[in-house]
Amino acid sequence: MQGVTFSNWAKTYSCTPRLYYEPTRIEDVMEIVAKAKKERRRVRVAGIGHSPSTIACTDDFMISLRKMNRILEIDTKRFTVKFEAGVTVAQLNETLPSHGMALSNQGSIGDITVAGAIATGTHGTGVAFGTICSHVLSVDLLLASEKIVECSRDVNSDIFHATMCGLGATGILLSATLQCEPAFHLHQRQFSSTLQEVLDNLESLVNSSEHFRFCWYPHTENVVYWKNSRTSRPPVKCGSWFWDYAIGYYSLEFMYWLSSFFPSLVPSIAKTYFNLLYKHPREVIDRSDKVFSFECLFKQYVMEWAIPRRETASVLLQLKKWIEESKFPAHFPVEVRFVKAEEFFLSPAYDRDSCYINIVMYRPYGKDISHHEYWHAFEKIVLSAGGRPHWAKDHGIRAKEFAGMYPRFGKYLQVRESVDPNGLFLNEYLEHVLVDESK
Ligand SMILES: Cc1cc2nc3c(=O)[nH]c(=O)nc-3n(C[C@H](O)[C@H](O)[C@H](O)COP(=O)(O)OP(=O)(O)OC[C@H]3O[C@@H](n4cnc5c(N)ncnc54)[C@H](O)[C@@H]3O)c2cc1C
């Protein structure tokens, strides 16, 4: 198709590829790659387009694998699932329970392709859990040479380690096999606290449940935290959450829109909504995927960095100080999650237990909201703490700086160039982050 405009979920970026494809067979994908090579065009695969950055954009050929979304194989003895690359996390969550299986961990939303999540290192929270890539057993990858290779920790191991959190730059992921586990329920307990109290007890809190996460409300001391752990107890629903969503959707967007004219309202919004939604302890027991899901409300700018876990308190206190001194009308929440060290060359959690800190500025009714001053201040703080940005989200980091952040950055480039010597799978975003323009 020509004239298709692709834009991301938050409508912060868009592009109009020269040709847009929705193939249904591997042969079609191979044909597109061959045509691109012949016409000296580049190819980018888009997932659902949830990435807050331009990582999926291209002006050349764009492929959506939304019609290649079959579950190929479910092994209920080994608890593994193999599927085509257009499959979403939500689709797996619909299918796996009827086979007595579940994903071990996941990020906040299901409306993303597993391939997109693999390419960007999508993560949930839990000190014993890596990103989604840590659950991948193997993938089938179409290389620029038009050859399909299977990669795993044992077979084509370098390509595998470059493809996990590999920015979709080593080839086109055609299918993947994930390690799952027997279906389980999670018991979620919600508590309110203060930032200082949580930071003072951080190590015991992060180890107190399987999936610990907290949100700090800027302009206040308030924190809400959640402890999720598996349970054999029967489901316990928490009915009033319906009203929370109603409050969230219908009034918060309006309040943030109003505050774009009167920024002094922002601290009161943070206090009021915390008191309405999170002040009181709550608990729920439900199917794991339902508890993992987190309501992200409406369109937003987001920036997220992974820092060494020991730097959590220092970074958050510096950010708090900056917001207080600058009086910047930072929106809530500042979300804090924890991820185990892993071995993939470009994983922000490469070789270190990490804390991911996500900051947000909403775009009420699609309105552009000033956020660059906040972004720069946060970036400066996390950079000095040895941070690495989430690849899918906003950041201003370039190849030269990445080379200093990632011990295996050179190895990644070497593997990538060996499988894609002419840059068939590159785009503008990847040129900024992979090619040192000063050389
Ligand atoms: C509301 C919201 C909540 C989010 N929550 C989280 C969270 O909890 N944790 C977290 O870590 N992230 C989170 N994200 C980020 C999100 O998980 C990533 O941006 C993810 O990549 C989106 O998947 P997608 O299918 O939309 O991929 P896209 O954004 O469309 O693409 C992402 C990348 O994947 C590549 N890609 C896609 N398919 C293929 C393929 N078949 N072969 C090769 N490359 C491919 C694309 O080229 C691109 O580089 C969130 C984003 C939003 C908007």
Image (cartoon, helix red, strand yellow):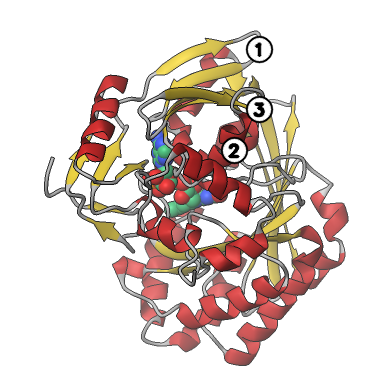
Q: Position of residue 123 (x, y in %)?
A: 60, 45
Write down the residue under mark 2.
132
Q: Nearer the viewer, mark 3 or mark 1?
A: 3
**Quadrant of residue 271 in the image?**
bottom right
Q: Where is residue 359 in the image (x, y as percent from the top left)?
A: 56, 67
14 displayed left or right of 10: left
In front of the other: 210 or 397? 397
Q: Position of residue 187 (x, y in %)?
A: 71, 37
In front of the other: 146 or 293? 146
Asked if residue 323 is positioned above or below residue 105 in the image, the reply reads below
Write down the residue under mark 3.
153
Dot 3 alpha-carbon crowd within 10 angstroms: few under 14, some 14 to 19, many 20 or more: few
Determine whether the beta carbon of the residue marked 1 sits less than 8 angstroms from the nearest atom of ligand 1: no
Mark with earlier residue (2, 3): 2
Identify which amino acid the numbered label 2 is placed on: Ile
Mark 2 and mark 3 residues within 8 Å of each other at the beta carbon: no
Q: Residue at x 80, y 72 (%)?
A: 196
Q: Work out how far the residue at label 3 is from the one at label 1, CA to CA, in angstroms.
A: 17 Å
Asked if residue 268 is positioned above or below residue 382 in the image, the reply reads below
204 displayed left or right of 237: right
Determine whether the beta carbon of the residue marked 2 sits less than 8 angstroms from the nearest atom of ligand 1: yes
Residue 365 at least partly seen: yes
Q: Which of marks 2 and 3 is in front?
A: 3
Q: Which mark is residue 78?
A: 1
Mark with earlier residue (3, 1): 1
Mark with earlier residue (1, 2): 1
